[in-house]
Image (cartoon, helix red, strand yellow):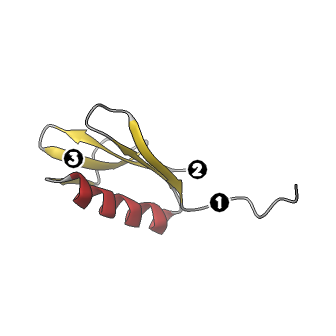
Amino acid sequence: MKRVSVSKHPDGWKAKVAGNERASKVCTTQAECREFGIGLAKKIGAEFTLHGENGRIRKKNSYGNDPKSIKG
């Protein structure tokens, strides 16, 4: 599964697809990159990860290939 992450960048914040060399977008605010990253993750059916200023994961969500309901 592909992954989209939002993390700190020297010019603000970046949204990046794992495996790509360059960021998909560099933003001035985390909120702007978060919205862009979620939209991108939905578009490509990827997992989305939001990192805080300290690099720790703040939020994680999957937007594709989720398993169907499992009886349990």
Residue highlighted by disc 1: 65
Residue drawn at point x = 52 percent, y = 50 percent: 2
Instruction: Judge by depth and name the residue closer to the eye, 35 or 21.
Output: 35
The earlier-in-sequence mark between 3 and 2 is 2
**Badge 1 density bin: few <14, some 14–19, many ≥20, Cα 10 Å:** few
Q: Are marks 2 and 1 in contact (CB under 8 Å)?
A: yes
Mark 3 or 2: the one toward you: 3
Instruction: Judge by depth and name the residue closer to the eye, 23 or 37.
Output: 37
Q: Name the mark on residue 1.
A: 2
Secondary structure state at the residue bearing disc 1? loop
Say which amino acid is labelled 3: Trp
The earlier-in-sequence mark between 2 and 1 is 2
Side (left or right) of 44 relative to 34: right
Gap in angstroms between the C-alphas marked 3 and 2: 23 Å
Residue highlighted by disc 3: 13
- Horizontal and vertical percent for residue 8? 24, 39
- Horizontal and vertical percent for residue 56? 38, 33
Q: Are marks 3 and 2 in contact (CB under 8 Å)?
A: no
Image quarter where the C terminus lies is bottom right
